[in-house]
Image (spheres, grey):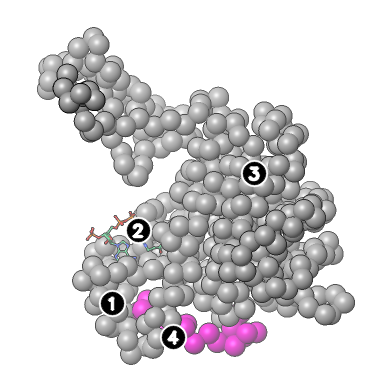
Amino acid sequence: MTNDGTLQVTDTRTGRSYEIPIVDGAIRALDLRQIKVADDDFGLLSYDPAFMNTASCRSAITYIDGDKGILRYRGYPIEELARHTTFLDAAYLLLNGELPDKDESQNWSREISHHTYVHENVKKFIDGFHHDAHPMGIIVSTVAALSTFYPEAKAVSDQARRREQVVRLIAKMPTLAAFAYRHAFGLPYAYPDAELSYPGNFLNMMWKMTEPRYQPDPILEHALDVLFMLHADHEQNCSTSSMRIVGSSQVDPYSAAAAAAAALYGPLHGGANEQVLRMLKEIGSVDNVPAYIARVKAGELRLMGFGHRVYKNFDPRAKIIKEIADEVFQVTGRNPLLDIALELERIALDDEYFISHKLYPNVDFYSGIIYQAMGFPEAMFPVLFAIGRMPGWLAHWQEGSADPEQKISRPRQLYVGAGMRHLDGTLD
Ligand code: ACO
């Protein structure tokens, strides 16, 4: 903790001055409460809709410098992790603070593969969803439902119990995701194969048909692994904050993760990659790009996959994804939507509107094009994001649960409604 000095403020309502400590570049919002106009005054609040300038926790998990386009998990640059480690090792890193050694990595991977099966009853209630149910709706519901299979998960302060649920959630996400997909197409559920890697097993559960054993294409398996890793954490984003906030009520982690998944479902968050694909299809051809950009600049619509609350420079994940796209297209053939995306990016990066608004492609701009080339339907895109993000949600849930400064999350409000009034029409 670095003590950076103090902030001196004078309240012009009373003429009183206050010294507020600055620690780690922040003041404590509660220190404002001493600033009052009268003894019975509640004290000064800070007003911050959408948490644009409020740190809600101290975290040692992920570092982002949005102006410089930097993303690090536990200090390691995402570029190095994406090149030299696996998604599961990165998940271990996020959860435990250090990368696993060779033995730890093997044991961790084995442990995850042994928990990929779900209770047979899960299949039954997935069967109850309508054939065109959005798979993200199925994920939100089935993740929540897992809490009913593991009532011991309520023991959130028991470290051993906590770890069991962490393993289960990471292990079962691909199974739930693949089952949600298979349900939509009326296909029989394909069971996990413990001999395959984490992404390889997911591809198996997605695509296995009559072959006795599914063998994933190594390039696609690797691409999916990197995509999961790039999505694994992004500090206090909307879904992770939801995980922390809901978890702060000490509910079990399945219920908290379901809330996080629900937050991720929205088109401004994890639903964006699905929207990018719809947008590219709507544009239809490279010739139509300038007209579309003109509509964006006129404020009629947003360029999906562009812009980020934190990155005001290139999203480092978007760069890595672009490299992977080339490898994937060598296997799957080039996705024709790529040309439209490249033209959109070229024009936007050269355009005054996008430059002045600091709008760059984000992680979702290219991920959807890769997923589509790999055969995933659009509705599965946010589900793929959710599989990747689960370790991040859990790492933050663990950190939040162990943080002695945290309590149940409960923001304040500025009440702007009616004053006291009575049912007989009189006012106070
Ligand atoms: N296209 C066009 N203009 C945009 C875009 C966009 N994609 N994003 C922001 N702007 C403009 C806004 O109109 C606004 O302009 P103004 O100041 O002239 O009114 C300005 O940039 C700031 O926009 P805000 O909405 O205030 O920025 P905020 O930080 O709240 O939004 C967000 C970030 C939600 C990601 C936004 O950029 C957006 O809607 N992007 C498209 C959706 C998307 O790709 N989401 C994925 C995010 S990444 C992720 O979740 C993994």
Sequence-wise first label, 1 or 3: 3
Q: Which residue is mark 3?
A: 254
Please tell me whether mark 2 or mark 3 is closer to you in this view. 3
Q: Which residues are magenta?
A: 328-346
Question: In the rendered view, would you say 83 is above or below 372?
Answer: above
User: Mark 3: which secondary structure?
Assistant: helix
Q: Which residue is mark 2?
A: 312
Circle 4 residues within 10 Å: few <14, some 14–19, many ≥20: some
Circles 1 and 3: CB distance less than 8 Å? no
Q: Amino acid at mark 4?
A: Asp
Residue at horizontal 67 percent and vertical 28 percent from the top: 157
Q: Position of residue 314 (x, y in %)?
A: 40, 64
Circles 4 and 3: CB distance less than 8 Å? no
Q: Amino acid at mark 3?
A: Tyr
* Number of numbered discs overlaid on the protein picture: 4
Q: Position of residue 103 (x, y in %)?
A: 82, 51
Question: In the rendered view, would you say 24 is above or below 184?
Answer: above
Q: Which mark is residue 293?
A: 1
Q: CA distance from mark 4 to mark 3?
A: 41 Å
User: Mark 1: which secondary structure?
Assistant: helix
Sequence-wise first label, 4 or 2: 2
Q: Which residue is mark 4?
A: 339
Residue at horizontal 54 percent and vertical 43 percent from the top: 243
Sequence-wise first label, 2 or 1: 1
Res 394 seen here: no
Please tell me whether mark 1 or mark 4 is closer to you in this view. 1
Magenta-drawn stretch, dominant element (helix, strand or loop): helix
